[in-house]
Image (tube, coloured by chain):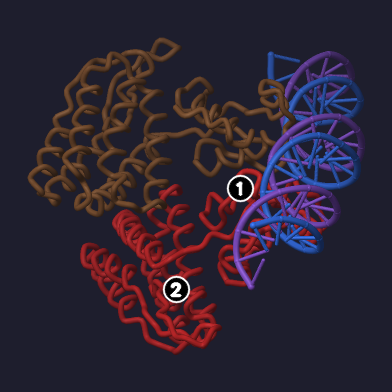
Chain colours: A brown, B red, C blue, D purple
Amino acid sequence: MAKGTDDTIAVRISKVLADRIISGAIEPGARLRQDHIAEEFQTSHVPVREAFRRLEAQGLAIGEPRRGVRVASFDLGEVKEVAEMRAALEVLALRHAAPHLTSAILDLAEEATKAGDKSRDVRSWEEANRAFHRLILAPCGMPRLLATIDDLHAASARFLFAAWRSEWETRTDQDHRAILAALRQGNTESAAVTLGRHVQWIGRKPVRTASGTTREAFAIVG
Amino acid sequence: MAKGTDDTIAVRISKVLADRIISGAIEPGARLRQDHIAEEFQTSHVPVREAFRRLEAQGLAIGEPRRGVRVASFDLGEVKEVAEMRAALEVLALRHAAPHLTSAILDLAEEATKAGDKSRDVRSWEEANRAFHRLILAPCGMPRLLATIDDLHAASARFLFAAWRSEWETRTDQDHRAILAALRQGNTESAAVTLGRHVQWIGRKPVRTASGTTREAFAIVG
DNA sequence: TCGATGAAAATTATAGATAATTTCTCTTTC
DNA sequence: GAAAGAGAAATTATCTATAATTTTCATCGA
């Protein structure tokens, strides 16, 4: 990931915190205390507060006046909501991107798919998956749309890491291949339909909780 | 509009500035100088900076490190982009809201439509139009989706005010009526299709510029 | 044992001050 | 007359300090 050395301190802090929240290093509901974070980053709390506002905008944190900021919680409802928003917006982006897709881009997307299939851990799978989606959608040239999709991907990744924290089994992604095949044939409609269904597929998995009982975990796997 | 007396100062400032940007009181590209704004609101610049971050997240302002913040500009491309995003997301919201719509809600939506038809100025038309959309979409119960749609409505309003700053002619909104009729009959699919088309309708209008030449102005009128 | 109560500590929100960067303006040069 | 450059003014980003609020936690009484 780009280090962004010319970023403002607030931006740097928000990137680090976003990564921690997404990866699950900070639990949902946990309080983010500005002075502690300021001390950790060797700054005052003013840039920390600006970083908080940025995280709020991404939906990763929730701030209440005079009560500080805490990591946003989420439930199955929000997983579904994000999945449906992604489906609607990624399909839109793909329709606009399709005319500008080159075979060079599609080759890169295929490599990303292969990298995903070979991933031994969630983290690298997510990275490859995000690269695939980004590659085929970016040529739409709609910055606002792409920014919104990026935020939704961050949310997706969070759900994914929460469910599949450690266990992860390799699996080949047929949907990605079907989408690429359709795009190569110029069949945008088919690719869009497959993408829409692909993104809404919610994986379920029994997970052993700390208290010993098993609950079901949910995440967007696409 | 709610005054929000228990809001933080930063939130209050961001609401006032957002309103000015949307109404066109501050021109696109204009710089927002933190000390000036701090003085106007009788505060220090710290809450002003937080308000800036909030405006950035809404897409109303753009900040560059060490160069401050300026009001975001927009072009026909962005008008189209916002229209298409609204179409995709409002259709999604409507499909989920439909099962929860009561005739009481639909009556209120009809009143909003009538209020829009009677409006003598853009500002009150926009308010009525926004109320209509909000009423029929809110019951979907998807907070993230609704928040995103709200931001897109703010952008739409901005485009509208920029194009129709003063001149405005009354017109009856047939689309709104068709959508309501379909919803009353339980025909969600038809309502969704009409809404999707309605939101993407971009009004065009010749406008006399300051330099005397006429250019074409564009805005989402729905 | 449980809940209420009231300091004490921690934390947030804002103000005022400072260093660093950018922008502006005026002059000089070609 | 236009372009370039130096210096001044304005502005941003950050730090330190302070007031106000919330949370914590021990104590008291039922």
Relative to B11, A181 lies left or right:
left
Amino acid type assigned to the residue bearing label 1 in the image: Arg
Amino acid type assigned to the residue bearing label 2 in the image: Asn
Crowd tier of the residue under label 2, counting other residues whose Cα lies within 10 Å: few below 14, some 14–19, many 20 or above:
many
What's the residue at 53%, 79% (across, down)? B124
**Is residue B217 placed above or below A48 in the rendered structure?**
below
Mark 1: which secondary structure?
helix
Question: Which of D11 and B191 lies nearest the eye of the viewer?
Answer: D11
Please report whichever mark, 2 or 1, sits nearer to the chain's N-terminal start.
1
In which quarter of the view is residue A176 placed? top left
Could you tell me which quadrant the N terminus of chain B lies in? bottom right
Q: Chain of mark 1?
A: B
Task: Tally the numbered discs.
Answer: 2
Q: Which residue is mark 1?
A: B53
Could you tell me which quadrant the C terminus of chain B lies in? bottom left
Relative to B16, A89 lies left or right:
left
Image coords of residue A132 (percent x, y): 26, 34
Q: Which residue is mark 2?
A: B129
In which quarter of the view is residue C23 placed? bottom right
Q: Chain of mark 2?
A: B
Asked whether residue A205 is in view, the answer is: yes
Task: Verify CB contact (< 8 Å) between mark 2 and mark 1.
Answer: no
Image coords of residue B160 (percent x, y): 47, 74
Mark 2: which secondary structure?
helix
Image coords of residue B14 (percent x, y): 65, 56
What's the residue at 37%, 86% (across, down)? B172
Relative to B174, B39 lies left or right:
right
